[in-house]
Structure formats: C-alpha cells, structure tokens
Image (tube, rainbow, N blue to C red):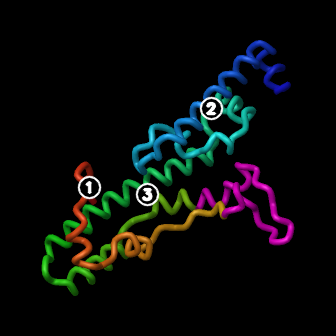
Amino acid sequence: MEDMGAIFGSVAAARLSRRFQRRARAEEARLGEVPTRPGHEKNLSEHVPSSLISLQDRVKALAVGGAPAWSRRLKRIHDLTLAATAELRVEWHLMAKQVRGDRPRFAAGWRQHAERFDFRPINELVERHNRYFPAEANLPMDIRTLDYVAFAGGDYRRQRLDAGWILAQFPPDLDAALASPPLPETAPRKR
C-alpha cells in the first residue's frame, strides 16, 4: 500500500483501497449467489478470481492498461474452446441426421471428421500458456519435484485438444447424437 501512496498520493491510495474492497465484496456476493453458465460470462473477472491477483497487481494493470497476459490468454483459450464445442455439437448432430440408421457409417465418418478438425489456434495458445504461465504468474517452485506449483496446488498446464478430446465430448454413437439436438444459437462455420 505504501507504493500506491507514493504513486498516487495517500488520499488517492485510500480511495482506491476502499473501491477495491467494495468491488471484492460485491464480487464475492455475486459469485455466491448464482453460478455462471459456461459461455455467458460478461468479462474477464469471471475467469480470474480476485484472490489470484493482488491489489497492487490490479492497480499496476489499471495503470499499464489491462489484465495480465496469462489471464487474457486463458480467456481466449476458453472462448475458442466454447466456440469449437458449439461447432462440433452442431456438426455431430447434422452428420447423425444425414446418415440416420447407418451406425457404422456414422461412427467411421465422425472419427474421420474428428481426426481432421483443426485445433491449431487453440493448441498454439495452450502451448504458450504452458510455457510462459509459471513466470508470468510468478508461481512458486516445489523443491522436491523441481516443478512449479499452481494456485491451490493443482497443475497449471492445459491439455492440448485433439481427436480424442472430440470423441470423449461427442462419441461416435448415432443414438446419442440424434438424442442431443444442437444448440439453437450456433451454426457450423464455413471451411
């Protein structure tokens, strides 16, 4: 807090501190009330809990002009994954309607589609995240394993998306595809 006082003056620092405390309380109350639905987040704070970014780092971000690179990258990974999931859901359902009744043809066609699906933009972001996140977030290192320890002791690494991920989300099962209609507000992208 002394740094903020030196930068902004003691009165401004006190105002900023009170403002951030009010925002933190409001955010905690909002998060406690209604769980968010995936894909309907309003802003970056939906993805980055306030406890992960210190008050000083938030003030620096405001002064510099934005959220940390790792949080913007995670938001982009999340958004691209949601878009790919919606696209795949629509394509899964459409393919099932086209080959209705022919289970082997659907299974073979869906596996082939899963192998060809392009995850390159997402996987490039995942690789950058896995490479740079420990330094950007200043993660501590576990001396025994010589690996970084993420927040809450979990693994900070994100997994690459591939055909196996698609088949786990949308199995090559014709009955399951026909029983699960596509989301109404999405449509497959043109390739």
Amino acid on which the number 2 mark rests in the picture? Arg
**Residue 166 location, x and y as percent?**
39, 71
**Among the two numbered marks 2 and 1 on one chain, the one whose residue lies closer to the N terminus:** 2
- Provide the residue designation for mark 3: 81
- The relative height of residue 93 versus residue 62 in the rendered view (above or below) is below
Q: Residues within 10 Å of mark 2 (few under 14, many from 20)?
A: few
User: Residue tagged by mark 2?
Assistant: 25
Residue 183 is labelled as 1
Label annotation for residue 172: none
Please tell me whether residue 144 belongs to the stretch shown in magenta: yes
Disc nearer the start of the sequence (1/3): 3
Residue reaching furthest to the top = 11
Give left or right: position of 81 versus 26.
Answer: left
- The picture places residue 85, in percent across and down from the top left corner, at 37, 60
Counting residues from the N terminus, which is met first, the one under dot 2 or under dot 3? 2
**Residue drawn 84% across and 20% down?**
6
Q: Position of residue 90 (x, y in %)?
A: 25, 61
Front label number (2 vs 1): 2
Amino acid tagged 3: Thr
Mark 3 Cα shell of 10 Å, populated few (<14), some (14-19), many (≥20): some
Q: Amino acid at mark 1?
A: Leu
* Mark pair 1, 3: CA separation: 15 Å
Point out the frontmost of discs 2 and 3: 2
The residue that appears at 27% across and 83% down in the rendered structure is: 108
Does the magenta segment cover residue 14? no
Q: Secondary structure at mark 3?
A: helix
Give coordinates of residue 79: x percent, y percent: 44, 50
Q: Which region of the structure is painted magenta?
A: 127-154
| Residue at figure coordinates x 55%, y 67% from the top left | 159
Q: Is residue 38 left or right of residue 23?
A: left
Check the image and name the residue furthest to the front: 33
Q: How far apart, in angstroms, are the residues tagged by discs 2 and 3?
A: 30 Å
